[in-house]
Image (tube, grey):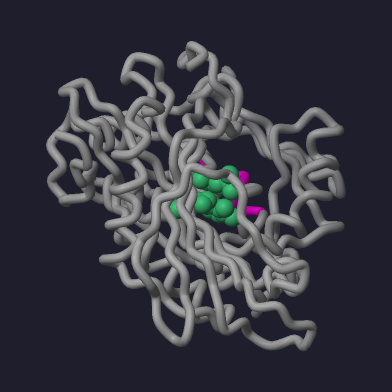
Amino acid sequence: MKEIDWSNLSFGYMPTDYNVRCYYREGAWGEIEVSSSEIIPMSIAATCLHYGQEAFEGLKAYRCPDGKVRIFRPEENAARLQATCRGLVMPEISTELFIEMVKKVVRLNQRFIPPYESGATLYIRPLLIGTTPQVGVHPASEYLFVIFVTPVGPYFKGGFSTNPYVITRDYDRSAPLGTGCYKVGGNYAASLRANKWAHDQGYSCEFYLDAKEKKYIDECGAANFFGIKDNSYITPLSHSILPSVTNMSLMQLAEDLGLKVERRQIPLEELETFEEAGACGTAAVISPIERIDDPQTGHSYVFAKDGKPGPISSKLYHKLINIQYGIEPDTHGWTKVVIE
Ligand code: PLP
Ligand code: COI
């Protein structure tokens, strides 16, 4: 195997040794199969290709300083995938099957789990697709659930450092009663133009307001938003954002640190009052926000005047990654050891 430069990995894709698969046929999930092929053979008329009957998940395996490999709250990813399945009329995968497949694929690809010191992790990507050949718009009767892994570095270059965002009013990633709360490919396809538009202007990412009124904060690209002020952790309550496992964990950790936690609509103008702000998700963990520009008004909401992450964001970040890496006690029982 070619040597992997663990410390310089990007958030990209490299093939690994194995993936695990499970097929849904005649109303039931079958046995777990191990594959060494990256290829999925399927009909040109498969529903996932035409009508986007597709869902995915994302979590990570961490090689820890005590030599063990841990995964973080996989039952929450299973629960979210089940919610997505209900949203797209796909058969649900039990939490038990989901976790068994995650553990199996991590163990099979041990040599791709980056060393602790590199700061890189093994990204785990579960994918569910409708495979029935048909042209009528209705749910498939056959599905493939596959999980592959790939070693990844930081989502944003520079890791835990501040980034500039820009408010988009010309594009929405999801409709008020649409699929924003599900992890389906269509939401990401819908975000590509806004993301390109933001990048073309030198921003790290686009920032979404609620699609209906453009009055409230929704999401920061493919991550949840949180703001900090007056010793409170404040994060949006919205049907069109993805319920983030990272955000859910940060809310608990904020409470543990003595902060008040508020999950509610956040009017755009309130950005002015935040002392710190961040984007959070599995890929980025916390990406502190330097500023959010509003091209319509020309206003810039600045959170990091010195360009550095704020003290509470830093505390939350370290607390979370120390739990994920088994460094601090896991008082909430969030981690699972996959390799002793
Ligand atoms: N929002 C969107 C749109 C995402 O794609 C993700 C990533 O999964 C998140 C938020 C963060 O969710 P999580 O913390 O579960 O990774
Ligand atoms: C996340 O893990 O936070 C993501 O947004 C995943 C992304 C690559 C779709």
**Does residue 178 show up magenta in the picture?**
no
**Is residue 224 visible from the viewing direction of this image?**
no
| Highlighted range, magenta | 269-275
Image: 335 above or below 145? above
* x 51%, y 24%: residue: 159
* x 48%, y 63%: residue: 145
Q: In which quadrant will I find the C terminus? A: top left
Give the main secondary structure, helix, strand or loop, of the magenta stretch.
Answer: helix
Q: Position of residue 7 (x, y in %)?
A: 47, 14
**Does residue 270 show up magenta in the picture?**
yes
* x 78%, y 49%: residue: 192
Q: Position of residue 75 (x, y in %)?
A: 30, 60
Seen from the viewer's position, the closer of residues 98 and 251 is 98
Q: How many labels sit on residues?
A: 0
Horizontal side, residue 174 vs residue 237: left or right: right
**Is residue 30 visible from the viewing direction of this image?**
yes
Q: Quadrant of residue 328?
A: top left
Q: Position of residue 160 (x, y in %)?
A: 48, 25
Seen from the viewer's position, the closer of residues 139 and 19 is 19
* x 20%, y 46%: residue: 336
Q: Position of residue 89 (x, y in %)?
A: 56, 83
Seen from the viewer's position, the closer of residues 328 and 338 is 338
